[in-house]
Image (tube, rainbow, N blue to C red):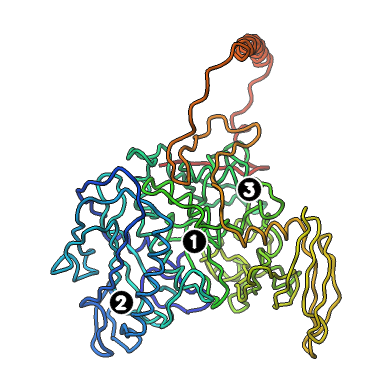
Amino acid sequence: MILLFLFFGENAARTKFYHVCGHQSIQDKEAISVMETTIADSFEPIRIKFSVTPDTLSCAAASGSVSWNGVNYTCEADDVLSAEKKTALETTLGNVNTYLSKLLKVRRLKDKITLKNYKSLTTSLGSGDNAEVSDIDLVVNVIPRPSKPNLEQIALTAITQIENQAFRPVQAVMFVNTRYLPTTASNIDSDDDRFFYTLLHESLHACGISASLYDRYHPLNTSTPHENIVLNATWHTKLNTGEQQREYSFLVTPKAHQFAINHYNITYITYGKSSVVSGIELETTEGIEKSHPEAMRFQTDVMTGFIMEAEKAKFSRVTDVTLAMLLDTGFYNVDYTQMQPIIYGNSRSVNGNPNPDYGQNLPQLKFPKGTFYEFSDSWDTTMFDFKHSGTLDIDSLGSANCAENHFSDTYCSATYFYNPMGYFNVTMEPTYDWALIKIPTTNCPNGKAFLPGNDTECGTYSCAANNSSYMFTYKGESNAEKTITCTKEDETYTSFKRSGEYPYTLKCADPVRFCNTVKQYESKFTSDPLYEYTPPGGGGGTPTPSGGSGGSGGGGGGGSELTDKQKKIIIIASVCGGVFLIILIASICWYQHTQKDEDDEDNDDKSTSDLYSSNSI
């Protein structure tokens, strides 16, 4: 992916995104400082102070100019923090604070935080009455800034200081784009929740979800970093037109690894003869690389690099993807009951079982119907979760033929990975890999859903106890309610009209998938989603996740001593195993002695399989 908008100074068309994050671009401006301090032994709810702090680089009036981040701005009325915008901003930040205080527990600071300015991008921090802050665990200075029109970026956040015990962030700056601040506050349960989730996203960067701190991530009860943190991989594939490859990154810390095991039933991501430890795939987009989970895998998670432009679609959610990343920082106990399951790219929502293909194959090839726009089903507006209706942004389409339309070196050098279906058209949106994703426009409340088709009005549903069927009630002819029973996928119900409107068609979704999906969508976690599940028959040599995601810390308790019967079984098994091993070694030696040497290049042949080459940090 290629980032469209790195800073407030970039000018680009405002289309379907409410917010495109530029965290890494601003974070890389200055090294993070380390503050000497002491911290408590126990964990308590985090104390965050959001301080809206205009300075000399903010527009105080619709006149004059300021120079910020290498760009000169002429202040206009939209760049001024009005009373209405300030109230909406502070109220929404308060709502974010309330949520985070329920979500996170920390080892609280015992000392004051002495504030510091961030490079040349702030002017008022670290001086005057606000130079020090007491009884707070994290200060986020929220600073208004001007921007050019049509910028899909609401805020930019950079961590400025961490403490020297657990290396947790204690100060951050959040630059807010005054031009696009709303005048109405937002909360997690608001009809329009985009502003809330945007500020929550930026606040979670401030809390430590940042590539700049990955090398500081550690287990909960020690500050020694994890042995493996980020793994970089290259996926090669050989086509008739030659070899192509694409770079990938994975967070392979213990809970990220456990996430992959639980969701995909894989301890390693394998292609051909090479494999890498499984984990959470990270974004590769320039400017936001590695600080976000990959949008094509985890589109609806709050920490992906963009918030969709859909006023009341309620698309973002705080999921077990973010849970794993927060736990692997080692900074926090996390209350998973404040989170919801990821639905996008979650094979468990299809039939309740993990699916390796969802973690190690291309989403366009393996994710279920409704995930991407299909030209063969162009009338179908229902999305993957049956809770959203959406459509392709036709205006963003362009020719996928690089010979006549070489629109991107990144795309044209790896067309298989970005357009494996071989469509004639792709979207001109590198932010989500040029894929034909649907833009959500409508959301159904709990108890209601969409069926595949072109009806954008929610219907009510009721699932059988074993998910073998479900009843769906919708408005049919002349708005009269009609109930159908779905027992299998693709049962089609004939077109109907409402008061002379254009015809609608409904198709049944697979009952197991439909019922699993809507149930998970409407739920919050009541048990640990990162429990230590082990795939059948696998896992040898795999890093062992440790600690409890609910915040209890540590591993499992000790077991009782072995009984005499158990000891005898172990001894017999050991003897049998030794005999078997001797026979196996002798057989291998005999086989090698009788075989001809093979060419080394044959062992590395990639003509029929893909493979990963990798390095890790």
Q: Amino acid at mark 3?
A: Lys
Residue at disc 3, secondary structure: strand
Kindly identify which residue carries mark 3.
238
> Counting residues from the N terminus, which is met first, the one under dot 1 or under dot 3?
3
Residue at disc 1, secondary structure: loop
Is 225 or 521 nearer to us in this picture?
521
> Counting residues from the N terminus, which is met first, the one under dot 1 or under dot 2?
2
Q: Amino acid at mark 1?
A: Thr
C-alpha span from label 2 to label 3:
48 Å
244 relative to 191, above or below: above
Is 29 or 218 nearer to us in this picture?
218
292 relative to 393, above or below: above
Quadrant assignment for the C terminus: top left
For this orientation, the residue located farthest to the left is: 128
Q: Amino acid at mark 2?
A: Arg
C-alpha span from label 1 to label 3:
30 Å
Residue at disc 2, secondary structure: strand
> Counting residues from the N terminus, which is met first, the one under dot 2 or under dot 3?
2
466 relative to 75, above or below: above
State the image coordinates of residue 446 (x, y, percent, origin top left): 64, 68
Instruction: Locate residue 433: give its quadrant.
Output: bottom right
Kindly identify which residue carries mark 1.
304
Kindly identify which residue carries mark 2.
145
Q: What residue is drawn where x is 33% and y is 44%? A: 42
State the image coordinates of residue 552 (x, y, percent, origin top left): 44, 42
